[in-house]
Amino acid sequence: MIVVTNVAPRTALETYRKRWAIECLFGDAKTRGLNLEDTRLTDPRKLALLMSLVALALAWAGRAAADLLGKRAPPRKSHGHYARSWFRTGFDHIRSRLRSNPLDAIASWQRINPEARKPCGVV
């Protein structure tokens, strides 16, 4: 790979790493995972709702993967890429738990942001 940049090399590599993570996320949400393009939704409200649900699913899968792997990263192939993405690792774990022990499956969901679930008054 040849990279040309007008910023510091470390900054450019860090930016590219972030971009690549986003590309992997899109891949998981589209052809390698949720197949969002197959919905053929055109109504902006319905599409916004679907994207909101996908964001929640990604958060849940990410939390499940973090719970499953702890501080480790998913295994890598010989060329250095992840064998399965964080999303796929979490998604497979949730799917397995939903089949065998549904209460265990929602445990990772409950740990996403406990502060956000504090009781609040009526506005």
Image (spheres, rainbow, N blue to C red):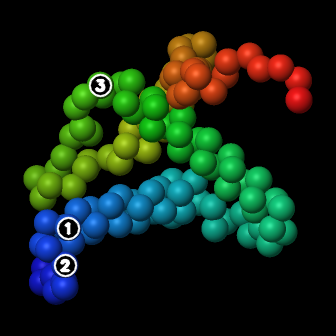
Does residue 102 appear in this view? yes
Residue 79 place in picture, x, y as percent? 12, 58
Does residue 99 appear in this view? no
The residue beneath circle 2 is 7
CA gap, disc 3 and disc 1: 28 Å
Q: Which mark is residue 11?
A: 1
Q: Which mark is residue 70?
A: 3
| Pointer 1 local density, CA inside 10 Å: few below 14, some 14–19, many at least 20 | few
Image side of residue 63 versus residue 43, left or right: left
| Pointer 2 local density, CA inside 10 Å: few below 14, some 14–19, many at least 20 | few
**Amino acid on which disc 2 is placed:** Val
Q: Is residue 120 above or below residue 3?
A: above
Image side of residue 54 versus residue 45, left or right: left
Q: Quadrant of the N terminus?
A: bottom left
Who's the residue at 54% across and 35% down the image? 60
Foreground of the two, 58 or 105: 58
**Amino acid on which disc 3 is placed:** Gly
Q: Is residue 56 above or below residue 14?
A: above
